Each structure stands twice: as structure tokens, then as C-alpha cells.
Amino acid sequence: MKIKSEMANNVISNGRIQHANTAQRTRSDQSKKVPDIPAVEVKNWLLHRHYTRHEYRICNALIDEELSKSNGENEYANYLKGLILRTEGNVQEALECFQKCYQIDSSNLNNRKQIAKTQFLLGHHAQAVKVYVDLITNMTTPDWETHHNLGECYIKLNQPEDAIKQLNLAIEFTKNEVPHLTLAKFYVSQDRVPDAVSTYVAALKIAPENEKIATELGLLYLQLGDNTRAIEQFETALSNSPNYSKALLSLGFINQMGEDYDTALSKYKIASHSTPESWSLWNNIGMCFYGKQKFVAAISCLKKAHYLNPLALPPACNLGTVFLTTGQPASAATYLCAAVSASPEAVMPYLLLGRK
């Protein structure tokens, strides 16, 4: 009887006999280790999975369900809904979602970051600046994106010195090339080409395989009249990305200006595979054929360029030139008048009309 009572107090588990009180104590200890997840956040992992997979339709349905259960108090659901709405172009509704997140948890800096970014997209640049400045004051560690976005706000508010200061801080706090590109473009808009060149050079040290940076630097060298360095940068861009159309167009243009039309056309042919709807590409191809005195091919290409962008000055003006050369003054007048309409301040269409 004593043996049976002892056996009754034992539990068979995985083929082994354990004491019942030991099993109960183990279960008790395990229950203490499991964290309590608030019911309102229990499906956040599922929302995150669908969002990262860009399954927005399913994600929206789950978000609406979770917000209904929590009476709109699920912070993460509101946050994701704001991101999705902004992606879909519903910026004002996205702002309302992020503001709701801020009401739920005002200590979460990400909520304020998204509010500021959304206000920037809505054109409320002064309001965005206030939020970003407050963010920088409360941040314990520097965040380059906040400084970068604040710099972009100052650009929109026409405060160049403040913009340059914030963008330089962003450059200091990251190895990402994005703030370099923003600062360099701003320098170009301010006609500070040497500063833009130095910024692009610094960006290339961070991202030497970035074909966009190399091409933009090459265009600046071309603007400064340094064709040798320009060609070097374009070739560097093409070594990293052989089909990068902007570098191909630029290098082809240099060949075209040197009357090396066959080499230029070979570059344009490669570029046409990735940008077949580029009016500037077909304009340059047309002028190469014009230089080779293949007037029918030139007219065909220039007409395509004019069709792709009827308001662009070069195709219309070049068509007028070709038609004058081939003795078709009526057709020339049609396109030259179109060039005048596209750009009334341009001198060349008037000069060509005078020749007619």
C-alpha cells in the first residue's frame, strides 16, 4: 500500500517517473518566465509581417480589425496605417494617424519624426521645422536623417545657411551618401559649383560604385570646361553600370561635339534600350545623322523627339534647321514657330525665321 501511494504521487513523463510536486513547481516557474503581452498588441507581429511583404490589402484589413477591438488605441496599428496611407498618397489622412500615435505615446520619438516628415510632404515646412528642432533637442544620440530632413525644410524656406549647417551635420553623423547628394544639388542651385564638386568628390569616397554620383560630378566638370575629368567620371560610372543612360548620353554628347558621330551613335544605341522614350536621346541621335548629312534619318529622329516633348525647344529648333537645309521653308517655319512658343526668350528660333 505504501508503494502504491508513492506511485500515485509520481507522474510519468517521457518514460521517466517524476515527483508530482516537482512537476508542479516546474510549471509554476515556467509560467513566471513567460512575459505578459498586452491584448491590444498581441497581433502586432502579424501586422508587421504583412507590411514588410507589401501585402497592404491584407494588412489594412487586419489593422481595421485591431483598431476596432482596441477602440483606436493600438499605437502600432495606427503607425502602420499612416505609413500605408502616405505610400498611397493620402498624406493628410496619414498625418492624422501619426498624430493619434503621438496622443497614445508622446515619448516615442518615431511618432514625431513621422509627423514632421508628413508635414513636410504637405508643404507645412515651418511646422515641420518646429517638430524637427524639438526632436533634436530631445534626442540622446544624433540621428542623421533628422538633420537631413531639417536641412531640406530650410531649403524650402529659403534659409540657405541653416540648410547647409544641418546637411553638414547629417554628413558628419553618417556614412550614407544621401546628405552629400542633397547638399551638392543645393550648391548647384546656388551656383556654387566648386562647392558642389568637392561635395560629390567626398560622396564618391563613401560610395565609389555609385554611378549617379560619378555622372553628376562629370556633368559639373563638363560645365566647368574640364572635358578630360568629365570623361573620366562618365567612364567610371559606366564601368560600374554599363547601361546607365545618363552617363551614356553625356559621353555620347562629348563625342558628338567632337564630330565623332559614329562613336556617339554607338553610345546612344545602348542608351535607347533603357530610355526609349527620352526626347533628348532622339534629339541627339537626329543631330548626329544631320552631321553625317543623312537628312531623312535626322528628320525622322527629330520628329520623334518633338512628339515625345512638344514643349521642348531643341527638337523644334533643330527640325527648323534641318528643313531649311533641305529647302523646305514652310515646314521649317512650322517648327520654328513652335520653338518660339515653347521658349519665347530664346534667340535662335528668331534668327532662323529671319533666314527663311
Image: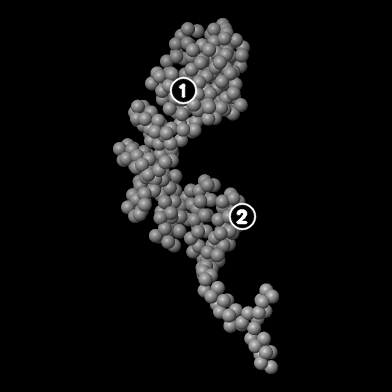
Quick one: label 2, few (<14), some, or many (20+) residues within 10 Å?
Answer: few
Locate residue 84, reporting x and y percent. 53, 51
Residue 222 — which label? Answer: none
Displayed quadrant of residue 328 = top right
- Nearer the observer, 276 or 26: 26
Q: Give the secondary structure at mark 1.
A: helix
Residue bearing the label numbered 2: 58
Residue 168 visible? The answer is yes
Q: Amino acid at mark 2?
A: Ile
Q: Amino acid at mark 1?
A: Glu
Residue bearing the label numbered 1: 232
User: At 51% from the left edge and 51% from the top edge, which residue is drawn?
Assistant: 83
Residue 351, relative to residue 58: is it above or below? Answer: above
- Colour pattern of the rendering: one colour
Residue found at the far bottom of this picture = 1
The answer to whether 246 appears left or right of 165 in the picture is: right
Locate residue 248, reporting x and y percent. 53, 23
Locate residue 163, reporting x and y percent. 34, 39
